[in-house]
Amino acid sequence: MPYTLAAAAAATGLNKTTVLRAIKSGKISGSKNEVGEWQVEPAELHRVYPAIAATAESTDALQRDTTAPPDAELRLRASLAEQRLTDLKAALDDMRAQRDKWQAQAERFAGLLPDQRRRRSWWRRRPWWRRLAG
């Protein structure tokens, strides 16, 4: 039995507008019934957005697994954050190198282009007082 927008939002913990936006963008498929209400198949909805019950069960399982001391979890999070920071720094260095390469190439090509300044006619190059004299 398909969900209405309100039921789909309640099942996933999202807002109705978020579900409608996902339908309109093509992320999930939905259709209007004869009354004009949107309907979404549960399998289609939960393909993209997990159900609240499944999310609650997974967080309960994580909370129940407290065999590791709290310091170990903090150390794990810190090491993951450091790894992420290292990856981001490497990506930034790579982007800077690419930027410098493209800038050097643009500067080389700028020297090959003809001068874009507009040339003044011979009449404009003469001083104004000579134009009066003829």
Image (tube, rainbow, N blue to C red):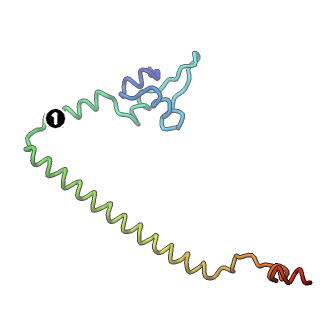
Taking the spot 37% from the left edge, 64% from the top edge, the residue there is: 92
Secondary element at image label 1? helix
Q: Residue at x 85, y 84 (%)?
A: 130
What residue do we see at 14% from left, 52% from top? 75
Please determine whether, in this image, residue 71 is positioned above or below residue 120. above
Residue placed farthest to the top in the image?
A: 35
x, y percentage for residue 47? 40, 35
- Disc 1 residue type (three-letter): Gln
In the image: residue 107, left or right of residue 77: right
Residue on which the image places disc 1 = 63
106 vs 1: above or below: below
Q: In the drawing, does residue 124 fall left or right of residue 85?
A: right
Task: Check disc 1: other Cα within 10 Å, few if <14, some if 14-19, many if 20+.
Answer: few
Q: Position of residue 80 (x, y in %)?
A: 22, 54
Picture layout, residue 98 above or below residue 18: below
**Residue 93 lies in what quarter of the image?**
bottom left
The N terminus lies in quadrant:
top left
Q: x and y percent of residue 10 in the render?
A: 37, 23
- Describe residue 65's horizontal placement relative to residue 12 as left or right: left
| Viewer-side residue, 94 vs 129 | 129
Q: Give coordinates of residue 32: x percent, y percent.
A: 56, 23
Please identify the quarter of the rendering in which residue 16 is found. Answer: top left
Residue at 79%, 78% (x, y): give it.
Answer: 120
Q: Residue furthest right?
A: 134
- Along the viewing direction, whichever of 10 and 105 lies nearer the viewer: 105
